[in-house]
Image (cartoon, rainbow, N blue to C red):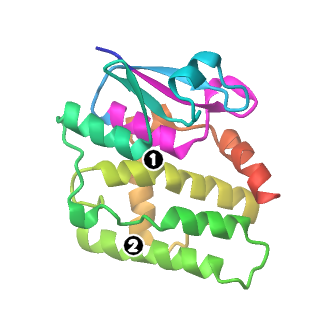
Amino acid sequence: MVLEIAVKAAVGAPDILGDCPFSQRALLTLEEKKIPYKSHLINLSDKPQWFLEVNPEGKVPVVKFDDKWVADSDVIVGILEEKYPGPSLATPPEFASVGSKIFPSFVKFLKSKDPNDGSEQALLEELKALDDHLKAHGPFIAGEKISAVDLSLAPKLYHLEVALAHFKNWTIPDKLTHVLNYIKLLFSRESFEKTKAAKEYIIAGWEPKVNA
């Protein structure tokens, strides 16, 4: 049984996988669980009719379960865990929200035009909190095994790394060794290599938001 998933196509390149971290999270889950799937690349600036018919809100990712298209990566990941329990990617509830403020903090800093608005410091504090957690519990958020929380964070950390290097010439400080090691572990996984967008599409995706 091959699952169908609709994900974002690259900006200006409709035949290439795009830069949506939520689409990548769903793809990572499929890859880590070794679930056969077929991708539909959706050009978000020219959405195909069939896609809008099954998914009127037009959001990605959406996955087809039992003839019904389901949106929202949180919901999708939950259903995949239920329907395909092995290998388990369930995150213990006490670790489920670790790192959850990193992405909004990154977006705020990326869009910031004022170096004194505290947005860089706020991001550093969130990364430091992740570093402390990984030091105590690592190498992954829930210990030795990768789980859903890591697959949610990995694409967001990739966006953070690529976009901040390009737009702000900013990198994660060397002293956050546990975070840097964690990123290396995540980005070197075969599932990540297969599902990541090329850096130029990450940059193209953020360009209009940064210059707004």
Q: Earlier in the sequence, mark 1 or mark 2?
A: 2
Q: Position of residue 107 (x, y in %)?
A: 63, 63
**Image quarter in which the C terminus is found:** bottom right
Q: Which mark is residue 131?
A: 2
Residue in the picture at 59% in, 57% down? 161
Figure check: 184 above or below 112? above
Label number found at residue 63: none
Residue drawn at the location 24% of the way across and 39% of the way down: 81
In the depicted view, which residue is nearer to us: 136 or 60? Answer: 60
Picture coordinates of residue 97, whole percent (x, y): 35, 64
Q: Locate the N terminus by quadrant.
A: top left
Q: Would you call the spot at circle 1 few (<14 residues within 10 Å), some (14-19), or many (20 or more)?
A: some
Pointer 1 residue: 187
**Quarter location, residue 14:** top right
Residue that lies at the very extreme toward the right in this rendered image: 211
Q: Is residue 170 visible?
A: no
Disc 1 to disc 2, how far (Cα)?
17 Å
Q: Nearer the viewer, residue 195 or 118?
A: 118
Q: Is residue 18 magenta?
A: yes
Is any part of residue 149 visible from this angle?
Answer: yes
Q: Tell me which amino acid carries mark 2.
A: Asp
In the figure, residue 53 lies in which quadrant? Answer: top right
Left or right placement of residue 154 versus residue 51 in this view: left
- SS state under label 2: helix
**In the image, which residues are magenta?**
4-31
For badge 1, the amino acid type reads Phe
